[in-house]
């Protein structure tokens, strides 16, 4: 009797495994919602004012953002354009910044998260406690 119950409990769980996330599921262009978004790196304050993320079919990605940084000693705004590589691991999207040679970059992933019905919820290594909500605007 216990064996039958155990098999009955496992069947629904096995049926849910058919929705595996593939790279083509997330290909598209995404725009950050609720801007500005404030992140708190170790020494200062980073405000993301505008952010667009493009995930391409081959696993490459481009991020274009307007960011303002403030610390006790400095403040500036910058248009940030960066190339990334992305992959799907354990059902989540992971982005790796293509670190220039001889630069001191943190180990990847630099941005990670999950798809939603209308976009992505991502987290940034600078401040993983702040969810970044992206709406898909194009495929």
Image: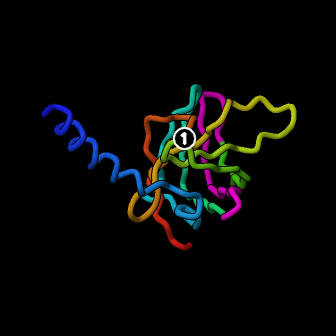
Query: Which residue reaches farthest left?
Result: 1
Point out residue 114 in the picture as x, y percentages from the top left corner: 46, 50
Q: In the rendered view, tell whether residue 41 sits above or below residue 113.
A: above
Q: Bounds of the magenta span?
A: 57-75
Q: Main secondary structure of the magenta part?
A: strand
Point out residue 97 in the picture as x, y percentages from the top left corner: 70, 44
Q: Does residue 63 show up magenta in the picture? A: yes
Q: Give the total number of marks visible in the rendering.
A: 1
Crowdedness near tag 1: few (<14), some (14–19) or many (≥20) residues, C-alpha within 10 Å: some
- As helix, strand or loop, the secondary structure at mark 1 comes to strand
Point out residue 128 in the picture as x, y percentages from the top left corner: 49, 35
In the image, taking residue 45 as reference, residue 5 lies left or right, namely: left
Point out residue 7 in the picture as x, y percentages from the top left corner: 24, 40
Q: Does residue 106 show up magenta in the picture? A: no
Quarter of the image for the N terminus: give it: top left
Quarter of the image for the C terminus: give it: bottom right
Q: Which residue is mark 1?
A: 124
């Amino acid at each position: 009797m216990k064996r039958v119950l155990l098999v009955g409990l496992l069947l629904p769980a096995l049926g849910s495994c058919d929705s595996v996330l593939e790279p083509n599921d997330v290909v598209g262009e995404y725009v950050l919602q609720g801007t500005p978004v404030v992140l708190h790196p170790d020494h200062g304050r980073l405000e993301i004012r505008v952010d667009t993320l493009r995930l391409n079919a081959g696993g490459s990605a481009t991020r274009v953002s307007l960011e303002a940084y403030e610390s006790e000693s400095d403040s500036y705004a910058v248009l940030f354009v960066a190339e990334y590589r992305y992959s799907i691991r354990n059902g989540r999207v992971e982005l790796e910044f293509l670190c220039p040679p001889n630069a001191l970059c943190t180990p990847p992933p630099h941005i990670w998260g999950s798809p939603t019905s209308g976009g992505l919820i991502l987290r940034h290594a600078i401040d993983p406690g702040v969810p970044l909500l992206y709406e898909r605007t194009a495929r």
